[in-house]
Image (spheres, coloured by chain):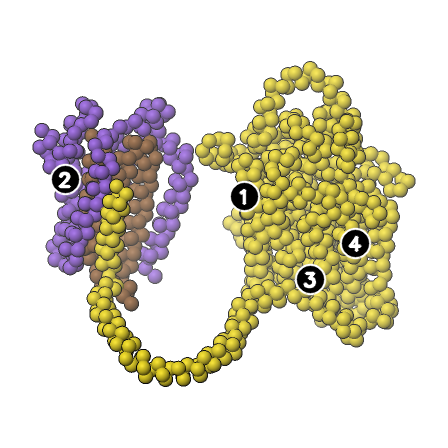
Chain colours: A brown, B yellow, C purple
Amino acid sequence: MLLNQFLLLAAILFSIGVYGVIVRRNGVLVLMSIELILNSVNINLIAFSTYHGLGGQVFALFVIAVAAAEVGVGLAIVLLIYRNRRSVDIDALDELKG
Amino acid sequence: MWFLTHTWIMPALMALSFLAILAVGKRLPKKGSEIGVAAVGICFVLALLTAGSWWQHTNDTGESGEHASGVLAVAPGAGDAEEHDPEAFSDVEQGCSRVVDEADHEGNSEKAEADHEGDTEGEEHSSGIAPGESASAESTAVATAEEGEGHAATKPVVRCFTWFDNGPADSSTITVGTMVDGQSVFMLVVVGLISLLVHIYSTDYVNGDRRYTHYFAFLSLFTASMMFFVLAQSTLQMIVGWELVGVCSFALIGHWWEEKPNSNAALKAFLTNRVGDIGLLVGMIILYFAAGRSFSILDINILAASGGISHGLLLVASVCLLAAVMSKSGQFILHTWLPDAMAGPTPVSALIHAATMVVAGIYLVARLYPVFFEGLSIAGSSVNLLAVVGAVTAMFGALLAFVQKDVKKVLAYSTISQLGFMVTALGVGAWTAAMFHLFTHAMFKACLFLGAGSMSHAAHHSFNMVDDYGGLRKIMPRTFWTFIIATGALAGIFPLSGFWSKDEILAGHGTFFSEGGNGTYHVMLAMLIIGAFCTAAYMTRTIWYCFYGEYRGVGTPHESGPRITVPLIILATLGAVVGFLNLPKSIGPINFPESLHTQFEQFVEPVGAYFPSISHAEFNVPLALFSLAVAGLGVLLPYLYYFKGGLAPIRDLSERNALARWGKNVLVNKYYFDWLYTDVITGFVKGPLARAANWFNAKVLDGIVDGVGAGAVVTGQWVYENIDQEVVDGAVNAAGTTATETGGVLRYLQSGRIQQYAALFFAAAALLAGVFVVATG
Amino acid sequence: MIAALAPLSFLAQSATGNSFDVPANVVFYIVAAFMVFAAIRVVTTDNIVHAALWLILVLSGVGLNFLLLQAEFVAITQILVYLGAIVVLFLFGIMLTRAPLGRADDLDNNMRPIGVAVGLLLTAVIAFALIRTFGNDSLTFEAYAGSQAVAGNNRTTALANEIFGPQLIPFEVLSVLLTAALIGAIVLARRD
């Protein structure tokens, strides 16, 4: 097996995740896209750990744990948005507009 | 030995008591105070047993430790090989100190040979005065010889376990444990005793308080954290104990937090201490790396004493740690929190001032003494930072006590001044004198505070001795007599305890005509003598206001109950007699038998590779007489002034003489330190700095602008007509049009939509990454 | 044969000649194709619940990839944490925000072309860099072999030694982070 086949798969997943982050309007769907990105990174980490020892696997585990935390907090934020605006449409969040 | 290896029971018991009081205290008949009193009582008994055990241990060492005296009491630099003698640390558990472990490792192979020759060599050493060494060590030769006579290396008993072990075992093991030697044992006794008496006293004093249970819980935690600090085996533990002590004092100073001044005082104490804590952290981190990644106090001390750590590092570390000591022990210039801390309940003040909070700073210096001793080059110099800070504090703190109306504030400044004595003593190398003064001071200062509490109990919770006290001598005889004895001890009247300890400190400086053992600190000696004079004087003034004249307060005062007076009597008795624990070897022609003199020194002062070889000053009769005379004068002058109404020339001097008035104002305003901190430093930015900027703006800049403006009008007119209308307008119009058009395009970018930003971000990142790849490829 | 499976034929050149390679490659390409398809469905489907279900497929595929890379423990953790916890959390999130359970045609905004462009650009840049850098490097598993010797022929033991040895402090910090996130989520989502 080649190293690159895993890395390229990860790159494709990453790009798909980025696409999702850009085009999705629903907050939950955006979070799902972020999960795609994180998972592609994990594939990279594991693939490289075949070269550099188990550190990559440890980091993948850390990323999984951080992702769990991120989803927890992210969904809480989405819930809060929903409670305040009766909608999770990210397009409607334009408070950053000066 | 069991008691020496199980000292951890004491802090653990007090911590348990804290939790138990919080959990079930409110439901008990005495609201939880019984748990606290019982726990601290057990601790005190344990501390006494530990002290007895240590006594035994030291005696055993003295008899069997033939290696000890000769080998370990050598002058600095005389022996690098000897200090690795594993025999001296046979009570250190494996893993607690890397230096000792390594020495053990090396020692084991050599031990077999050494055993054969041991007897003969050992005797040579135990006779102690190895002449060659003394001669080579020159200036400290006498001291070395003297130590050789009576002292054996007191082996610290160290027990620890690995808290966590990160990475390779030799580099970053973090251990937790207890380090028991004379110093920690005596502090345990002090903390246990004062805390026990304060507990008993408090059951009466804060009776019926709205947070009675909470109060006792925190007393327990306070005791626990101080014991934890005292027993610390690693510097990490010291930091934890240090901060815990700070938190507890914060909670107790602010015990009546509903009133704004009290919570302010608590905050002030806490924040001022934070300033010093930065120094503590930095210093400890420096020491950690300097000692080859070890938190063990034993490692740090051995390396510092043997020159294993460079002088520069030690200097920086000791200056950083000194900042911590200044804040914790109320040394100038970070002392301002201590008088305000009087807002707490009086027994807490007694605890803070006698046994826990402020003493922690002194204990820290004493514990890491080799760091300070080598870092500040205490031996053989005539000035160093520690001594200067201490002497300044001792003198100026005592002066401040003169103008206070509040009896507790007098005592607070008195504590600051006495702590200054201890710091100076440490600074001039009189380690034992400092520890001994800490010991005696704990007794009589606790007695004074508790006495003040007893008076305020009688005088409707007022501490204002000038307006609300007076004539209490007849009404409260027990309080009066205990207060008098404690005052005498504080002023250093023979033969009360304060006399012995103060005199030891003074003698440690050397006299005016001869050198002290560790260098000559004449300036500090003079300042301390002035401090001692002031101490005697302001205490006499306090006695006058409290106990003589007519009662000036409201209501009818009465003597306090036995739970208040019994601790007073115990403390006054101790304050009178503990001075005999460290009698000098001889006073003039009188020689004391060996079992009587310098007992404290023998059982408290560490001797061995983890302690620098300091010299001990001899009792100096002229100096003692002189300081006694100064103290007597300090009593006499206020006596004539207040009691006899004499000294007419200086009466109301401050109203007639401008200089005196100025001096008094300085004192009343506490040298303007509070003013400096709150008004100048914090006020500077918002006040004068802003005004100065405003003035500069209004006068200077505006003037320039006006002048320039007038000229500009003239030039402008010409420019307007010729250049502006023709050239510039064209350019400006063009620029404006361009800006409008660009803005029209760009405004779509600032949509406020996060996803658009994300798209831009990713696109830009991808483009940049592409450029990067191509450029580097 | 393998070359016929995908246009990315250069990937199939076996450098090691390991007998495991051929079936492993077959499995990989099948799984990878599924994953890419499922991932695309996640970001394009117009049914939120379906998106979550497609996500399950992708995540399982990632787990399978971990197995192919001989990271069994991480693979199991991946399945347990992602499929067991995170996807369920997503489904809860969908329900709690009253998302439309059927088809909905307003799930995407009007930036699809931009998204496609950015995605393709990213893929192109990353792929270019990867192919340039790693070319035909094959997986070695040498690092695993080294740690096996230490850990008595057990990769999970080796991993445990790694986590609870050199990586202990990050691990502890991570537990603090999780606690903080837990508290943060509670504070945010609490109704008060």
Q: For this rendering, which residue is in front, B612 or B447?
A: B612
Marks 1/4: CA–CA distance: 36 Å
In the picture, which quadrant includes the N terminus of chain B? top right
Left/right placement of residue B572 relative to residue C46 reads right
Of circles 1 and 2, the one toward us is 1
Q: For this rendering, which residue is in front, B513 or B295?
A: B513
Q: Where is residue B317 in the image (x, y as percent from the top left)?
A: 59, 45
Circle 4 Cα neighbour tier, 10 Å, few/some/many (<14 / 14–19 / ≥20): some
Which chain letter goes with mark 4?
A: B
Marks 4/2: CA–CA distance: 90 Å
Kindly indicate whether the residues beneath marks 1 and 2 are on one polypeptide chain.
no
Of circles 4 and 2, the one toward us is 4
Q: Report which residue position mark 3 lands on.
A: B409
Q: In which quarter of the image is residue B468?
A: bottom right
Q: Position of residue B23 (x, y in %)?
A: 51, 49
Q: Would you say the residues marked 4 and 2 are in contact, meaning their CB atoms lie under 8 Å apart?
A: no
In the picture, which quadrant includes the C terminus of chain B? top left
Left/right placement of residue B765 relative to residue C7 reads right
Q: Residue B285 carries which label?
A: 1
Q: Report which residue position mark 2 lands on.
A: C34
Q: Is residue B669 above or below residue B15?
A: below
Residue C30 in sight from this viewpoint: no
Q: Earlier in the sequence, mark 3 or mark 4?
A: 3
